[in-house]
Amino acid sequence: MKTLTSTGSSIRQYPSPCLLFDRQKITCAADVLKSLTHKYNCRFLMAAKALRSKTVYQILNHRLNGFDVSNFNEYNILPDVLDKKTIWFTNPILDSISFNDLTRKFNDLIVSIETLTQGLMIIKQNRRVCLALRLSTRPLEKNNKQARHSRFGILPDEIKNFGTLKQSILGLHIHKGTFDGSEINTVHDYLKMAEYALEITKTHKIKMKILNLGGGLHHLARQDLDTLLYKLRLMINPQTLIYFEPGQYFFKDAGFAAGQVMSIKKQREIIVTLNLSGSCHLKWSQPRYCSLAINKGKKTARVVFCGPTCYESDRLGEFAIPLTDVHKLKTGSVVMFSNISGYSASWNSGFNGILPAKLLFQKTMRSLHHM
Ligand SMILES: Cc1ncc(COP(=O)(O)O)c(C=O)c1O
């Protein structure tokens, strides 16, 4: 039985292990943001770390306002000409960087700082670099005693130490991240962040020509995006450019992975070992099994898919698989998973003699049955 993609090729023809991304989905996601840019006077940058790939950077460079990068390796792999695009540079180890090299692609440059030393070092190198102050999200979590606190950003008490450097700061940056790469930001969360940023600008007399509210947009539905931007615009001075730097947003529903069955063992459950590794190839993904069957019956069996390393936790997950699929599982068959994060491609690595997965882009992916 074949499961067809739009190109008519069988999934068995994908080299495995591989990570596969649907270009059309990535493009559509970027087009949505592009349409909001003018409507709400906001700017969208791609967090380059979210999928390290020249293909992706090319697609997004045509549609977005620039990139959020953390170091020279990320900057170097971006398209050679970033004419009038913005590079927003955020790096916790800023202190030894030459900022003159970060404009050689004809881009604008904004650098987030979180210490006075960083600010002074940058101004000494290049007075024209735009500075933004990265705020810690800790004060927003004060009622949540369980929260593990972010190590990034500056606390309000520390801002007074900036003295005259405050005049060189053009605005604020705040990104709410969690500890496993899955930020969950609601419209309410973004509004709270914006409110907090406004309060800081008033208390500390800091300009707010720019406000960067970070990433995490993948949890918002299309309608929520409009609601958020509409509400932000009511709150924030129309002259302030509002930035977002989403990453996973572009790869939601666009990522797949294929692995080949290497061995099958029947214990209490069926243990299927693939050449696709959960630990090496699927970091920050929650894979969902894609059924091969077009007419699946109702009966299912529990199947645990595991990766090929000797690491006990190298597992993709346990799934209820239609018996029609289970009967077809044999050494050499290819199994497909959806819900693969762009970050998996960036973290994609080898371990224990296992090589990184291949990274492929497909014009569009269809006919996969998610379980
Ligand atoms: C500073 C910063 N901005 C943006 C992002 C992108 O986040 P997301 O992929 O959740 O949109 C990240 C991700 O780690 C980040 O660290």
Image: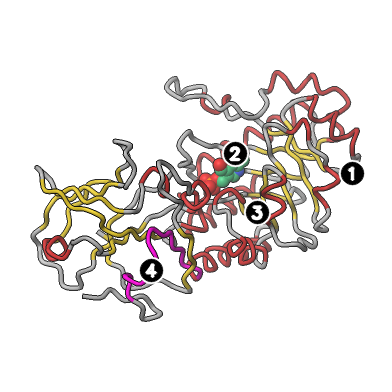
Q: Which mark is residue 128?
A: 1
Q: Is residue 316 above or below residue 169?
A: below
Looking at the image, residue 10 sits to the left or right of residue 329; the answer is: right
The type of residue carrying mark 1 is: Arg
* Mark 4 CB lies closer than 8 A to ligand 1: no
Q: CA distance from mark 2 to mark 4?
A: 37 Å
Looking at the image, residue 16 sits to the left or right of residue 188; the answer is: left
The type of residue carrying mark 4 is: Tyr
Q: Secondary structure at mark 2?
A: loop
Q: Is residue 66 above or below residue 34?
A: above
Taking the spot 82% from the left edge, 51% from the top edge, the residue there is 103
Mark 2 / mark 4, whichever is N-terminal: 4
Q: Is residue 335 above or below residue 317?
A: below
Provide the residue span drawn in magenta: 10-23
Q: CA distance from mark 4 to mark 1?
A: 49 Å
Q: Is residue 147 above or below residue 234?
A: above
Q: Which of labels 2 and 4 is toward the front?
A: 4
Mark 4 burial class by Cα count in 10 Å: few <14, some 14-19, many 20+: some
Q: CA distance from mark 3 to mark 1?
A: 21 Å
Q: Which mark is residue 175?
A: 2
The type of residue carrying mark 3 is: Leu
